[in-house]
Image (cartoon, helix red, strand yellow):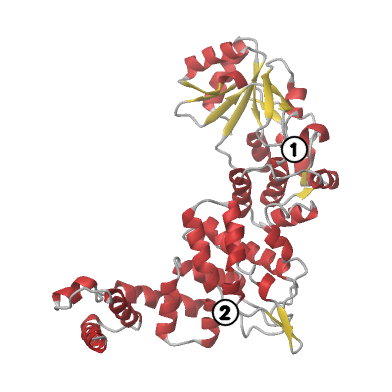
Amino acid sequence: MKNSIAERIAEYVRDAGGRTFYVGGFVRDRLLGIENKDVDIEVHGIQPAALYSILEKTGEPLSYGRSFGVFALKGEDIDIAMPRREHATGSGHRDFEIDVDPFIGTLEAARRRDFTINSMMEDVLTGEIVDHFGGRRDIDEGVIRHIDPDTFIEDPLRVLRGAQFAARFNFAIAPDTIELCRGIDLSTLSRERVEEELKKALLKADKPSIFFESLRAMDQLDIWFPELKQTIDLEQDPVFHPEGDVWTHTMEVIDRAAAFRDRVSDPYSFMLLALTHDLGKIVTTEEKKGRIHAYEHEVKGMPLVEAFVGRLTSEKSVKDYVFNMVPLHMRPNVAAYSKPVLKSTNRMFDAAVAPGDLIWFAEADKPVVSGSDAFSGDREFLLERLRTYEETMAKPYVMGRDLIEAGLEPGEDFGEILAYAHKLRLAGIEKDSAMKQVLTYARKSRKGKR
């Protein structure tokens, strides 16, 4: 995982009396055997002006904060920084005073990082690993451990970073790090930074549940994930949910959903669907005749879903996806069990912004009946019905211009007439026959309104 640009810079730096290191996630991921195309280097022992001159020999320098010692090269995937000291000036993620110090030394440069696994440095030219805080040991043991308790608490984002690292690498968070995270206030974080860490957990981890279980252990669900916290100890019918409460079910669903991320149209939205699909049980769960029910939770819980998703993202496409799919999430497994007529599944798929994703979600969410597989879904049935739906939608159908050409004048009821035409389309009625039925429907409807 050497980088030719980094080596060229390092050679110039060496000739100027300095030293260049790969740092942070680049070193961590190399030791974990994970490909990382984001190259980060840190240059020690020369002044910022000297580094800028070196970068001019290597390419076209870009400065993202020259006074902070942060550079890049145009057209190259490499971030170049100088050692710096940081002092918190407030409680927010960006509230820091930064001083560049090229001669701070590797120990103090590594100390300002968050976790031991991110503190290692590798000499670009010699390959020597500088590991002041036992990062290599913690990688071998699968542990996320903070470095300095005094500096760690200055940046609240580190709470979420620790949780997402634990999820991505399937590591455990050290008990003293969990305890330290308990007392950190996350309310000053921006939605964008929280969503960035959430996305990494949902899209890069094989078991995204570790992210949320870690936050639960830290008692850090209240600010950004309060609805999820309300699912803890919320009972379900043990006949269909022997796994336990709604929290446990949700964690299992997001882990199963992660296996389908490469098959769906929008992996991030799909994972948010998995995360929020049962929030409605918070307001609908009740016991009747000795059985636990949550009737219409997929619909009645939408205000909770909207609040949850809206708190975490401003992306309209993501909101549209989740808000459309949550109310539909139970229908595929019900259909796979009851085997309804064709037009019923056509209508189900037609209502979904991502019909195929609905099937993969059903696979992640399919109920399990104790001691049997009678209500566990039928993927092949659903996939066959989806193919039929797609074939149906690819056939010619009655459009507005067809009706106008047939002499039907547009009016206030034109949308209603087109909706009727669409119902015939979903029922598989061929265009010629549907055209006759739509015209008959329109004339009778208009005649009745005179």
Give residue 294's position: percent from left, percent from top: 66, 78
Check disc 2 and report its element: helix, strand or loop.
loop
Give residue 51's position: percent from left, percent from top: 57, 15
Quick check: 288 above or below 48?
below
Q: Please tell me which residue is depicted at 73% across the width and 55% down the height of the picture.
A: 221
Q: Quadrant of residue 156?
A: top right
| Three-letter amino acid code of the residue under disc 2 | Gly
The answer to whether residue 427 is left or right of residue 273 is: left
Number of numbered discs: 2
Quick check: 188 above or below 245?
above
Crowding near the residue tagged with mark 1, few <14, some 14–19, many ≥20 C-alpha atoms within 10 Å: many
Q: Which residue is tagged 1?
A: 115
Work out whether residue 338 or residue 88 is closer to the camera in this orientation and state it: 88
Crowding near the residue tagged with mark 2, few <14, some 14–19, many ≥20 C-alpha atoms within 10 Å: many
Check disc 1 and report its element: helix, strand or loop.
loop
Quick check: 83 above or below 150?
above
Q: Evaluate whether residue 130 shows in this view.
A: no
Spatial CA distance of label 1 from label 2 is 43 Å
Quadrant where the C terminus sits is bottom left
Work out whether residue 214 or residue 90 is closer to the camera in this orientation and state it: 90
| Three-letter amino acid code of the residue under disc 1 | Phe
Q: Please tell me which residue is depicted at 61% across the width and 21% down the height of the picture.
A: 68
Work out whether residue 418 or residue 240 is closer to the camera in this orientation and state it: 418
Q: Please tell me which residue is depicted at 46% across the width and 60% down the height of the picture.
A: 265
Q: Which residue is tagged 2?
A: 377
First in sequence, mark 1 or 2: give its number.
1
Give residue 106's position: percent from left, percent from top: 74, 22
